[in-house]
Image (cartoon, rainbow, N blue to C red):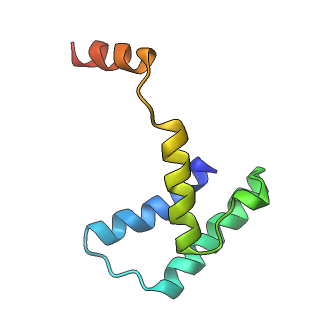
Amino acid sequence: AGTNLAFSWICLRGLRKVGVDVDAQTADCFLHLWNVIGYLSGVMPELLPNTGKEAFWLDKLIAQSEFKSSPAGQELTQSLLA
């Protein structure tokens, strides 16, 4: 579900951040396209957002559960910085 959002919602968010005007209908169509791809890739249907609002909240939930500090992540960061 997170990877699917990376190709749908996060791309839309990025386009808007750089000033591209993406209207609601185009955004919904783009989300739908990626929902079809996600479904065919095996993403559970209940994890495919139907609206931008659902995508926003799914992105937030995934970030809360997955993007946390960990000893392994800290070690990797230190290694990369060195």
Quadrant in the picture for residue 15: bottom left
Question: Looking at the image, can residue 6 be seen?
Answer: no
Please report the residue visible at 42 percent of the width from the left and 15 percent of the height from the top: 71
Determine whether 31 is above or below 45 in the image.
Answer: below
Q: Is residue 51 left or right of residue 47?
A: left
| Residue 40 appears in the figure | yes
Q: Residue at x 48, y 85 (%)?
A: 24
Q: Residue furthest left?
A: 82
Q: Which residue is at the front of the view, 4 or 68?
A: 68
Q: Quadrant of the C terminus?
A: top left
Q: Position of residue 25 (x, y in %)?
A: 53, 87
User: In screen coordinates, is 43 left or right of 16?
Assistant: right
- Horizontal relation, residue 25 to residue 34: left or right: left
Where is residue 31? Give x, y as percent.
Answer: 59, 71
**Against 20, is 8 above or below?**
above
Q: Position of residue 46 (x, y in %)?
A: 76, 60
Residue 47: percent from left, percent from top: 70, 57
Identify the residue shown where x is 33% and y is 82%.
21
Compared across the picture, whether 34 is left or right of 43 comes to: left
Q: How many marks?
A: 0
- Identify the residue shown where x is 44% and y is 15%: 72
